[in-house]
Structure formats: C-alpha cells, structure tokens
Amino acid sequence: MIKFQPDRPVRAETLHELLLEVEKRVVVSVIKAKGGHMTKSADFLGIERSGLYKVLKRHGLSVDRA
C-alpha cells in the first residue's frame, strides 16, 4: 500500500490544474515508494512503463528528479 499525504496544500485555479498537480504528486510518491523501479511503479499505477515516462515528461520530470 502506498500512503499519499500531500506535503503542502494543492493550489490550483482550474480543475485541470488541480488534476495535473495531484497526478504529479501521486506518480512521484509511487516512484519513491518503489525505490525508483519504473516497471514496478507503472504496474502499481496500472499503466504501461512507456505511459509512465510520458507522464513524467508531461510534468517536466526525469527519473532523477522524481
């Protein structure tokens, strides 16, 4: 189980911005919890590994920065 506890309040002006911020925080939390293992992280999230890399790219993150 991954426990997601925001480290700071989510501030967004639109629903789209809110969803993007929550997506980013969840993905980063999962990658950290899985020790940086991308395949395990993608499996946990229910997406393909390539999809996980697309999410990281969308948020301007690399594996090192996640």
Image: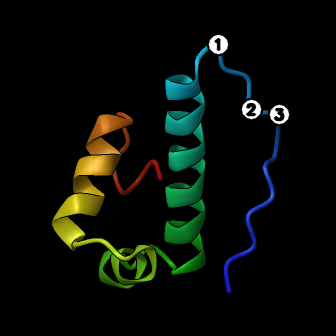
Pinpoint residue 51: horizontal percent, then vertical percent. Answer: 22, 60
Is disc 2 placed on a helix, strand or loop?
A: loop
**In the displayed image of the protein, which residue is found farthest to the left?**
50
Is disc 3 placed on a helix, strand or loop?
A: loop
Q: Residue at x 38, y 36 (%)?
A: 59
Callout 3, which amino acid? Answer: Pro
The correct choice, above or below, for 48 with respect to 53 in the image is below
- In the image: residue 24, left or right of residue 37: right
The correct choice, above or below, for 16 with respect to 45 in the image is above
Q: Which residue position is annotated with label 1?
A: 13
- In the image: residue 37, left or right of residue 22: left
In the rendered image, which quarter is residue 10 located in?
Answer: top right
Q: Circles 2 and 3: CB distance less than 8 Å?
A: yes
Q: Residue at x 52, y 81 (%)?
A: 34
CA distance for labels 2 and 1: 10 Å
Pinpoint residue 31: horizontal percent, then vertical percent. Answer: 49, 68
Q: Which mark is residue 3?
A: none
Callout 2, which amino acid? Answer: Val
Report the colour scheme. rainbow
Callout 1, which amino acid? Answer: Glu
CA distance for labels 2 and 3: 4 Å
- In the image: residue 47, left or right of residue 21: left
Pinpoint residue 30: horizontal percent, then vertical percent. Answer: 55, 69
Q: Residues within 10 Å of mark 3 (few under 14, many from 20)?
A: few
Pinpoint residue 54: horizontal percent, then vertical percent. Answer: 23, 49
Q: Residues within 10 Å of mark 1 (few under 14, many from 20)?
A: few
Q: Which residue position is annotated with label 3?
A: 9
The correct choice, above or below, for 58 with respect to 37 in the image is above
Q: Which residue position is annotated with label 2?
A: 10
- Of badges 2 and 1, the one in the foreground is 1
- Of badges 1 and 3, the one in the foreground is 1
